[in-house]
Image (tube, rainbow, N blue to C red):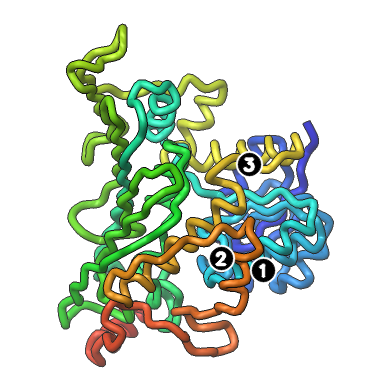
């Protein structure tokens, strides 16, 4: 197997993933980050010197086979396009494009390249989600009609360490993140398990501002979004993107004509499988609560991996795709990735339009690309100081109070 030369763009999350590439006979050859301290920390994690860059333009000229794109959440597409122009493979952390127009640019550039592109969405590879896919693929649940995906990640607003690490300046993207945009951890698993692709989306937000004494610079007071999709096989998904209600959990539920399967909130990696009493498959129990097994040759490495084994397994899939010269399967391929981004982006427009349904484009089709090729509306600030062109909250007039902002700045000084 060829030893791949890997460049890391974004030394924070990027270096979390780099170790798994090394485990899989790849070599980290270059790291790029505009924060010198992060570069220093990244180098300390490696056992030999590696080229470092503060400029992507210089970094991308370094000889390499693939790039881990782990820069700002909403800014992956322009850098992926630059990789495609050089036929460099792309392992993209989270959403593929922050605007609809970028999605069009991304796909057009990809189709002119020889690059492998993979969305580095790791939640489908968690143990319970792998088991759900196995059961669905067996056909025992019958035709899949409905699926739920919840990624619930509330954060203590007084957590100084979190603020200084993830929200460390007032125009940071996390302060302007619509609740539908961080979509892949809830939508990716149910797309993977069922094989379905969203074709229409509608959404509603749950608005609940923080208390006045909370350090807060966020321009959205939405705690969650309820997102519903109608899919290409007639099924329906209900997903939440990154929500903040109740207690922390990742939960998924798959319902078919013969039964259902879900991981239970607060029950670790266990799953509950239940069938209709008249449709229990031969050799199966009507109801079963159990913890699945990995049954994988790399179980020792999986067990040590972050995100429930998902990080290692996602990296392994990418390395295999590059070595075999093939694009990754649904929903990790570029067309699925742009569908997920579209659900997030257009789902928020549905919220702003009172729940109006939006059709999800298929960027394989030029007629769908034409609809969005000039659509660069964004809720985020640009690096050059350009202001957002779209609200980020279901109440477009919401903003944090002066007192909350002052408390936020005090938090940064601690």
401 or 222, which lies in front?
222
Point out the frontmost of discs 1 and 3: 1
Residue 105: mark in rendering? 1
Q: Residue at x 25, y 76 (%)?
A: 221
The answer to whether 7 is drawn above or below residue 312 in the figure is below
Where is residue 133? Give x, y as percent: 43, 31
Q: Circle 2 — which element?
A: loop
Which of the two discs, 1 and 3, labels the residue nearer the N terminus?
1
Q: Circle 3 — which element?
A: loop
Q: Circle 1 — which element?
A: helix
In the rendered structure, the answer to whether residue 190 lies left or right of residue 245 reads: right
275 or 15, which lies in front?
275
Q: Which residue is mark 3?
A: 328
Where is residue 120? Give x, y as percent: 55, 49
Is residue 271 at all visible to an observer of this figure?
Answer: no
In the rendered structure, the answer to whether residue 5 lies left or right of residue 401 reads: right
Where is residue 247? Give x, y as percent: 20, 52
Point out the frontmost of discs 1 and 2: 1
Number of marks drawn = 3
Quadrant of the rendered structure where residue 242 is?
bottom left
Q: CB atoms at circles 1 and 2 under 8 Å apart? A: yes
Q: Which residue is mark 2?
A: 97
269 or 104, which lies in front?
104
């Amino acid at each position: 197997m060829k030893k791949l030369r890997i460049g890391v763009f974004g030394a924070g999350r990027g270096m979390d993933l780099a170790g798994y590439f090394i485990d899989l006979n790849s070599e980290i050859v270059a790291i790029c980050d505009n924060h010198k301290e992060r570069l220093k920390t990244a180098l300390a994690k490696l056992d030999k010197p590696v080229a470092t860059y503060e400029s992507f333009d210089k970094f991308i000229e370094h000889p390499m086979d693939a790039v881990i794109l782990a820069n700002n959440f909403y800014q992956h597409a322009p850098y992926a396009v630059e990789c495609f122009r050089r036929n460099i493979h792309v392992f993209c952390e989270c959403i593929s494009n922050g605007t609809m127009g970028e999605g069009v640019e991304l796909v057009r550039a990809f189709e002119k390249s020889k690059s492998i592109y993979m969305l580095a969405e790791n939640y489908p590879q968690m143990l319970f989600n792998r088991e759900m896919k196995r059961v669905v693929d067996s056909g025992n649940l019958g035709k899949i009609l409905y699926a739920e995906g919840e990624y619930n990640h509330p954060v203590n607003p007084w957590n100084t360490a979190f603020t200084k690490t993830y929200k460390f300046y007032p125009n940071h993207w996390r302060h302007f993140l619509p609740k539908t945009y961080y979509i892949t951890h809830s939508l990716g698993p149910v797309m993977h398990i069922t094989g379905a692709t969203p074709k229409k989306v509608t959404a509603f937000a749950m608005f609940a501002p923080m208390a006045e004494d909370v350090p807060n610079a966020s321009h959205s007071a939405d705690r969650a979004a309820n997102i519903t999709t109608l899919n290409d096989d007639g099924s329906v998904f209900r997903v939440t993107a990154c929500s903040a209600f109740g207690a922390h959990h990742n939960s998924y539920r798959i319902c078919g004509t013969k039964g259902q399967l879900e991981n239970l909130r607060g029950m670790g990696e266990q799953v509950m499988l239940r069938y209709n009493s008249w449709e229990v498959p031969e050799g199966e129990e009507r109801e079963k609560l159990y913890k699945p097994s990995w049954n994988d040759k790399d179980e020792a490495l999986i067990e040590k991996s972050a995100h429930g084994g998902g990080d290692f397994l996602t990296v392994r899939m990418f390395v295999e795709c590059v070595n075999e010269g093939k694009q990754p399967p649904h929903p990790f391929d570029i067309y699925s990735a742009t569908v997920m981004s579209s659900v997030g982006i257009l789902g928020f427009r549905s919220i702003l339009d009172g729940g109006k349904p939006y059709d999800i484009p298929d960027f394989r089709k030029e007629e769908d690309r034409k609809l969005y090729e000039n659509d660069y509306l964004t809720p985020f600030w640009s690096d050059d100081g350009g202001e957002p062109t779209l609200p980020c909250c279901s109440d477009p007039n919401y903003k944090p109070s002066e007192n909350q902002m002052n408390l936020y700045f005090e938090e940064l000084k601690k």
